Image: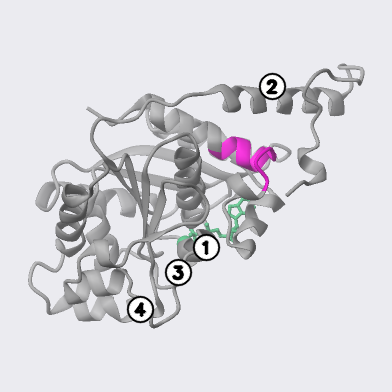
Amino acid sequence: MKHPESEVNEQSTPFDETTPLAREIAELTRRRQAVAKAALPLPSAPRVFTVANQKGGVGKTTSTVNLAAALARTGARVLVIDLDPQGNASTALGVEHRSETASVYDVIINDVPMADVVQKSPEFAALYCVPATIHLAGAEIELVSLVAREQRLRSALDQFLQDSAEAYHYVFIDCPPSLGLLTINAFVAAQEVLIPIQCEYYALEGLSQLLNNIKLIERHLNPKLRVSTILMTMYDSRTNLANQVVDDVRDHFPQQVLTTLIPRSVRISEAPSYGQSVISYDQNSPGSLSYLEAASEIAHRGAPQ
Ligand SMILES: Nc1ncnc2c1ncn2[C@@H]1O[C@H](COP(=O)(O)OP(=O)(O)O)[C@@H](O)[C@H]1O
Ligand SMILES: [Mg+2]
């Protein structure tokens, strides 16, 4: 699909490069050519990310879907596990998740093998999704009485990765906006935590609680867990506030914050209503380019030691 936002002249810039618009177009062209050329290194073992932040609306699902799509587009085999009863990641990846669909609920509660519920996303060749249905809303409570209630997703995922005929390179687990048993299951199943932070005033609020919880999980349930990646989302370069928030987060987490900032973009927000990632919906838009660049940073940084 073509949009005015992506109408960028490839060959030469017919404008005087000194005007702001011409500079912006030239810059977009440069970025587009850079991501088109980039071949990303593949990890030797699957990297499992939990995408978490107990705040809602910070860009967890959007980042999960678009980073997964960006990596799949460049040749990685990628699995998204939708662990939010809302099922927004499933919607954005264009996979079936009506209430009767076999889903992550059956995996966690009924011991159904993950291989029986995984679906191929129509988005990219090697992009797969374990969907969430509305049944997952009851799982927090049902989990309480189950054996090994914190380890259920990990056991299922380990088995799935071990049995897969073709190796997966990345797994992204999209969490609900809470720190309940579902999110704990995600922390136990992963080695890396990716925290999306919205560039707004209350961005850091609640972050210390999240980090404390992650520390507790690391100490008691999953010693391999690391906060490897922080991604700043919904960035608006025109506001001083956004720049202050970015500086603040970079001061606190110099190692983890990606250089790439995800801009606030209409294309990013409208892609899910077409059952698409922004990468396929409008590949050359600034939002898509940013997710491709963030994915490239993640791939080049590699797993934490
Ligand atoms: N970079 C962005 N620009 C514009 N809208 C965005 C951006 N990222 C997310 N959104 C929108 O903000 C809302 C919340 O994002 P979402 O990824 O669902 O957050 P979460 O999963 O943390 O609740 C959604 O409507 C989404 O489309
Ligand atoms: Mg979400």
* Secondary structure under the numbered disc 4 in the rendered image: helix
| Magenta stretch: helix, strand or loop mostly | helix
Please give the residue where the numbered disc 3 appears in the rendered image: 87
Please give the residue where the numbered disc 4 appears in the rendered image: 137
Q: Is residue 247 visible?
A: no
Query: In this view of the protein, which residue sits in the foreground, 66 or 19?
Result: 66
Question: Closer to the observer: label 3 or label 4?
Answer: 3
Please give the residue where the numbered disc 1 appears in the rendered image: 94
- Report how far apart the C-alphas of labels 2 and 1 lie in the structure: 31 Å
Q: Amino acid at mark 2?
A: Arg
* Secondary structure under the numbered disc 1 in the rendered image: loop
Looking at the image, in which quadrant does ligand 1 appear? bottom right
Q: Earlier in the sequence, mark 3 or mark 4?
A: 3
* Secondary structure under the numbered disc 2 in the rendered image: helix
Residue 276's spot in the image, x, y percent?
Answer: 58, 56
- Report how far apart the C-alphas of labels 1 and 3 lie in the structure: 11 Å
